[in-house]
Structures are given as C-alpha cells and as structure tokens.
Amino acid sequence: MRSGIAKGEFHLKYQPQYDLFTGRIVGAEALARWQHPVLGELMPEQFIPLAEDSGLIVPLGRWVLFEACRQNRKWQREGLVPITIGVNVSARQFRDAGLIADVRETLGRTGLAANYLELEVTESLLMQNADQAVRLMDDFRKIGLKLAIDDFGTGFSSLIALKSFPLTRLKIDQSFIRDLETDENDRSIARAIISLGRELGLNVVAEGVETAKQQAFLASCKCETVQGFHFGRPMSAEKLGKLLGMSLTTINAHFG
Ligand code: C2E
Ligand code: MG
Ligand code: MG
C-alpha cells in the first residue's frame, strides 16, 4: 500500500449531493479507490481497515484531502458552480496531531476556501474522546471548515455531546433509508433525525437514497439534502464536472 500511494495507484470518485428542493448539486463526497496492478479496482472496505491498522491511513488520508481540495478548486477555476467537497476522516487520522496542520497547508496550497471543505467523522470516533474531539472541532470551525457526522444513528451519540460538538451537518446512515418503504420504524427514525437536525440548526443529508419513493418520503419530511444511487453513483471527476456544467433543467429530470 505504501508503494501504491507513492506510485499514484489511488484515485477518487465523487458522489453528488443534491438539494432536494432546488434540484441543484450542492456538494460531493470524495471516495477513495485503489487501482491495484494485479487485483484491479479495490473498494474502501478492502483497504481502509488495513490502512487504519498499519497507520498508513495518515499518509493516504493526507493524499485524499489534498486531491479532493485540488479538484474542487479546479472546478471553481473552470467557472463551475461552487460546491462543498466532503472528505472522510478516520479515527486514527483524527487522533493524529498533524491533521489540523495538514488541513491548513492543503487549503493554502490549493487555494480552496475553507467553507468548501467538509470533514466527515463518525459518531463512535467522536464519542471515544469527546473532550478532545470538541477542542479539535472548535479549531476546525474557527478556520471555517464544515463538519459532518457520518453514518448518524449507528453509534451511541449522547444528545448532550451532540449539542456540544460544533457541527454543521448530520448524515443519516443508509441502513435507515434502505427500508423506508416497508419499515415503519425506519420511517420514524428518519423523521426523528430530520427534525432533530432542524431543531439543532444542522443540515441533514440522507445517504443511500436508491428510489423515487424514498426521495418522496424524505421530501415530505423536509430533508434538505440527498445522496445516493438514485441521483448518481460515485463517478470520475470529469463526469461530475460535466454534471456541474449542465443546465438546471437537465439536472431537474430527477426531481420531476
Ligand atoms: P461512507 O462515508 O458512509 O460513504 C458512503 C458509501 O455508500 C460509499 O461507499 C458509497 O458508494 C455508498 N453509497 C452511496 N449511495 C449509495 C446507495 O444509494 N446505495 C448503496 N447501497 N450504497 C451507496 P464506498 O465508496 O464503498 O465507501 C465505503 C466507506 O469507506 C465510506 O462510507 C467511508 O467510511 C470509507 N471511505 C471511503 N473513502 C475514504 C477515505 O478517503 N478515507 C477514509 N478514512 N474512509 C473512506
Ligand atoms: Mg462519508
Ligand atoms: Mg456514511
């Protein structure tokens, strides 16, 4: 993996996030892929755990951060509508003292304004060391970064802790979205998370939206933002750039 990073075998795919009411792309999540010379394209579940155990997640994560910011700034320089780029941060990276310096340096080198970068962290990561996490997140918020809780609902967030984290967004885990059409409990949970987010002044993103019916339910709950195969799979930077350049009417095809 170390040599794979050095040889440029990693690349990023970008999955669009849409505002459910305007139909506009407002963000994209950067998702790592490893083009292995022998094994072909590897998905994150096949290499992120290994990277975490070995500590290589720190250099890999640094590369992901740089590449995502560089690409986002490039789209902006091309005159495309500015979006926020989401970057996943694992527990090991979050504990690494150099993360904040890496973020500052990356923003400086790429010229991306901080408010177009969002770090995604999981609930369990935050709860492991809540006090330290609050301090670090405060530092990030001071720089102007956005902060999201990923896979929300799967960890054990205490609502008190949630209030003390300087967050901008909750991402509802896809396990609650999957069975929205058939499972009344999932509908209740999704509705509750959306109103919790609203009350706390946070943007809420539903992840893993695959069908028009799920979209309709989320719209009825006034969920602001959606991400999922129904709107677009993770795609190359080139393809996302084309989508950003398309007229709104075309994008609106989904939103009938
Ligand atoms: P995540 O951050 O929760 O990312 C969302 C995952 O859900 C992505 O999987 C995405 O392809 C998938 N997904 C999106 N829409 C749908 C849908 O409609 N249906 C279904 N079934 N799946 C959908 P992916 O790319 O395989 O990434 C898996 C996980 O790996 C991510 O989950 C994230 O935790 C981790 N990961 C990916 N890239 C990085 C990275 O650069 N650094 C770190 N630390 N973790 C990463
Ligand atoms: Mg994520
Ligand atoms: Mg997630």
Image (cartoon, rainbow, N blue to C red):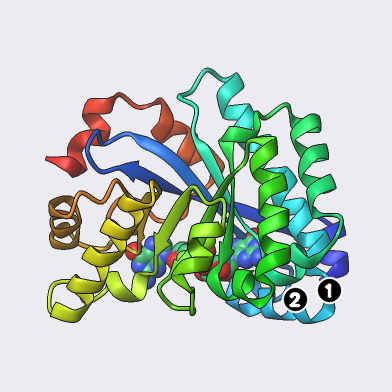
State the image coordinates of residue 56 (x, y, percent, origin top left).
82, 70
For the residues marked 1 and 2, what is the alpha-carbon distance in whole angstroms? 5 Å
User: Where, quadrant-wise, is the C terminus in this rendering?
Assistant: top left
Residue 9 vs 146, above or below: the answer is: below
Ligand 1 under 8 Å from disc 2 Cβ:
yes
Q: Few, some or many C-alpha atoms within 10 Å of disc 2 (few <14, some 14-19, many ≥20)?
A: some
Q: Amino acid at mark 2?
A: Glu
Cβ atoms at labels 1 and 2 below 8 Å apart: yes
Residue 67 vs 125, above or below: the answer is: above
Query: In the drawing, does residue 160 fall left or right of residue 214?
Result: right
Viewer-closest of 14 and 120? 120
Task: Tell me if I can see residue 241 in this picture.
Answer: yes
Query: In the drawing, does residue 108 fall left or right of residue 71?
Result: right
Q: Residue furthest front?
A: 160
Q: Residue at x 76, y 44 (%)?
A: 103
Q: In terms of secondary structure, where does tag 1 sit?
A: loop
State the image coordinates of residue 230 (x, y, percent, origin top left).
27, 56
Q: Residue 52's mark?
A: 2
* Among the 4 quarters of the image, the one containing residue 132: bottom right
Q: Residue 198's mark?
A: none
Q: Residue at x 70, y 36 (%)?
A: 143
Q: Which residue is mark 1?
A: 55
Q: Amino acid at mark 1?
A: Gly
* Among the 4 quarters of the image, the one containing residue 249: top left
User: Where, quadrant-wise, is the N terminus in this rendering?
Assistant: bottom right
Residue 7 vs 19, above or below: the answer is: below
State the image coordinates of residue 167 (x, y, percent, origin top left).
52, 51
Viewer-closest of 106 and 37? 106
State the image coordinates of residue 149 (x, y, percent, origin top left).
51, 61
